[in-house]
Image (tube, grey):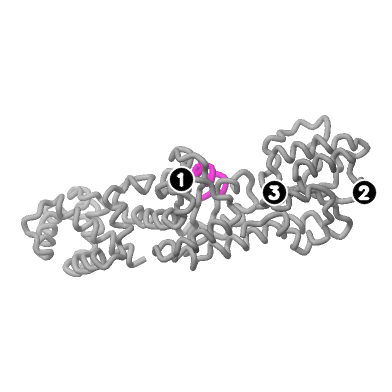
Amino acid sequence: MAFTVRDIMMLPSLSRFNLVAGKGGLGNYIITAGIVDYEFVEGIDYDLSKAFEKDSIVISSLLFAKDRPEMILPAIKFLKKSGVGAFAYKQILFEALPKEVIEYADKNDFPIFSFKEGAWFENIIFEVMAAVEKDDARYLSEAHIEKMIKGEATQEEVDNIRRGVSLLIDRAVSAGYIKMPELDANRVLRSFYISKNLKEKVLVSKYEEGIFILITTSSWKEESHRIILEEVCQSLSLPVKAKNIILSRMHSATELDKAFREGYFAWIAGLIDLRKVSNFEDLGVYSAALLLANTPELKGFSKGYMAKLKGYEETVSSYIRNGGDVVATSVDLGCHSNTIRYRLNKMKELVNAPNETDHELFRDLSIAYMVAKVLAR
């Protein structure tokens, strides 16, 4: 399940923590960890609005409050307002916190812990982030993603995944998939788990040496998801522009599997290059064919259709890549346009449709070709 304050207290470095206030907040979610020390020092010009991540545990030596214990309460209030899930301080400068801090934490269910020597800040942060990443990988394993893509995951399994990952999935979800030689999926994952401002709305998971980008918001506006995707591409230095990633349609949180399935098939459609689109639904009739590619009817149609065109694979591929443009196909293959027209007429005869128009041929050919590519992958 997604980690709570209570869960992370079981980690080795955090097992030495002592709860001093805010017991009612032990169910708060934790998806990352951070440090606070100089941010609240008077006289330092620092933008506090972006200093702390929501649903994080923040640790401190309270150096900013040295000889100024009255500064602790405003800092705690700010952390609570920022959505921080818990706070822990090392007992170096303060053995105990002021009474008003304890009262505030208890009243507002904001867990505060103390710990002594022997627990290093770096170890605490590493353990929290490693545990969150490991838990996400367990729920969004390649086997689980595979079942969702194939449409074999039960609703109970989808709900378990949704509740298990660290991302608090909101009402609307969409997914995009990328895979290319320049992509270092492991580097992207490392960058994601140490990034700020992404983990509230995005989850990145690895699949077949590529990555899925899962986006979630309370808004059902597609524009919101495209803006977040742009932020992901920039923050994680992805080797692809956001406009070139085809997102699934937006689904409710309970339809997480559909978002993954559409995101993956949309990537395949992008490889086939049927259309230059940015959203799954813009694929038109191909969006339906993609999702039905594994049905006996479409499998049989595709297999039979493509078997009749053996020896024409290069022409078929180029013709589809060029959107049915005969001249562009001839340039691509380095031959005369009449040669392409001859081949198209020959293909019509081979599929027993000699009277089809080029448009009708392209329609049937593109669907058969696309289904074959989906099945091959």
Q: Main secondary structure of the magenta part?
A: helix
Magenta stretch?
228-238
Q: Give, as a three-letter code, the residue at label 2.
A: Glu
Q: Give, as a three-letter code, the residue at label 1.
A: Lys
Q: Residue at x 66, y 57 (%)?
A: 3
Q: Give, as a three-letter code, the residue at label 3.
A: Ser
Q: Residue at x 58, y 65 (%)?
A: 138
Between marks 3 and 1 in the image, the one whose residue lies nearer the viewer: 3
**Disc 3 from disc 2: Cα separation:** 23 Å
**Position of residue 114 in the picture relative to residue 352 (left or right):** right
Q: Secondary structure at mark 2?
A: loop
Count up the numbered dots. Answer: 3
| Figure quadrant of the N terminus | bottom right
Q: Earlier in the sequence, mark 3 or mark 1?
A: 3
* Residue 282 on image: x %, y %: 33, 45
Check the image and report above or below for 242 versus 139: above
**Disc 2 from disc 1: Cα separation:** 51 Å
Q: Earlier in the sequence, mark 2 or mark 1?
A: 2
Rendered image: mark on residue 241: 1
Q: Residues within 10 Å of mark 3 (few under 14, many from 20)?
A: many
Between marks 2 and 1 in the image, the one whose residue lies nearer the viewer: 2
Instruction: Check residue 77 for magenta coloring.
Output: no
Residue 246 in sight from this viewpoint: no
* Residue 11 on image: x %, y %: 74, 62
Instruction: Check residue 235 for magenta coloring.
Output: yes
**Disc 3 from disc 1: Cα separation:** 30 Å
Q: Residues within 10 Å of mark 1 (few under 14, many from 20)?
A: few
Nearer to me, 199 or 355: 199
Residue at the spot of label 3:
56
Rendered image: mark on residue 8: none
Residue at the spot of label 2:
95
Residue 195 in sight from this viewpoint: yes
